[in-house]
Amino acid sequence: MEAYERLAAARAKGRPSGLCYIRNIFTDFVEMHGDRRFGDDGAIVAGIARLGDLPVTVVANEKGDSTKERIRRNFGSAHPEGYRKALRQMKLAEKFGRPVVCFVDTAGAFCGISAEERGEGEAIAENLMEMSALRTPILSVFVGEGGSGGALALAVADEVWMLENACYSVISPEGCASILWKDSSKVREASRCLKMTAEDLLRLRVVERVFPESGGFDQVYATLKTELYRALRQKIALDTNVLLQRRYDRFRRMGARPER
């Protein structure tokens, strides 16, 4: 499949949302609301749950599964209070020694005056800074569209995984085409140039693993449940300083020229 076709699959109506993954992978999920500063943002779902016998904190973008629900959740594009809610739960996970699992599916953070007035850029930047040094394991899974800083704010992790039809990009292909060529019809070319597919990002070492979707999403849920448990158990066993150093090294390797 071409990059644009992967993007279309990531955006497809009926594709499982963040809550679908939470309900099918975890048990005993208790959702937490609000950022203790402004309000609650339905575009981000966060709370505590169990993965087998392992207590975890789960954070997910949620787009909604009906027109009414999509409007309420702002189509998965979070306001600053959404990112602050996510960070509040991550800091609680750090305090109580729970690993963090994030499911990313967003076109990007909400682009509007109200979000800017409440500090959208600051909220995203704070997440990046805090997640880079969070003293508990973090694993992020891209399950749909991953756009710009809105996705990165949930993806500063020890490992980043993707489904085969998920995408991850600094900007949408439509935005890229409009900026570079002033021509929205070049969206397919922009999709190729952005190297946004799971295959591209695995080759560039931006992500660690890619999971096939050919067996259906029930199989995806089952595989993720097993692999998340295995990976988190391994990371919990690490000394915290080793965990943080490996996280730091992971990002330092990105973009580095290979030694000759």
Image (cartoon, rainbow, N blue to C red):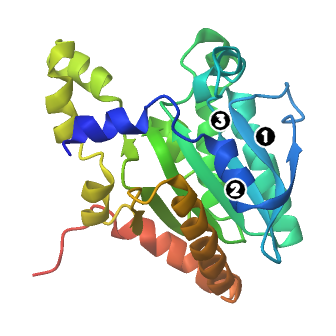
| Identity, as a three-letter code, of the amino acid under mark 1 | Lys
Mark toward the start of the polypeptide (1 vs 3): 3
Could you say which disc has been placed on residue 62 in the image? 3
Answer with left or right where residue 110 lies relative to residue 209.
right
Whether label 1 touches label 3, CB < 8 Å: no
SS for dot 2 = helix
Task: Give the alpha-carbon distance from disc 1 to disc 3, as whole Å.
Answer: 14 Å
Mark toward the start of the polypeptide (2 vs 1): 2
Image location of residue 255, percent across then percent down: 27, 61
Q: Residue at x 80, y 69 (%)?
A: 98
Looking at the image, residue 39 lies above or below residue 82: above
Q: Residue at x 58, y 22 (%)?
A: 110
Image location of residue 166, percent across then percent down: 40, 47
| Identity, as a three-letter code, of the amino acid under mark 2 | Asn
Whether label 2 touches label 1, CB < 8 Å: no
Q: Quadrant of residue 71?
A: top right
Answer with left or right where residue 118 lies relative to residue 15.
right
- Crowdedness near tag 2: few (<14), some (14–19) or many (≥20) residues, C-alpha within 10 Å: some
Does any portion of residue 156 appear in the rendered image?
no
Q: Name the residue beneath numbered marker 2.
A: 24
| Identity, as a three-letter code, of the amino acid under mark 3 | Glu
Mark toward the start of the polypeptide (3 vs 2): 2
Q: Nearer the viewer, residue 169 or 1?
A: 1
Does any portion of residue 148 appear in the rendered image?
yes
Task: Give the alpha-carbon distance from disc 3 to disc 2, as whole Å.
Answer: 15 Å
Could you say which disc has been placed on residue 85 in the image? 1
- Position of the C terminus, as image quadrant, is bottom left
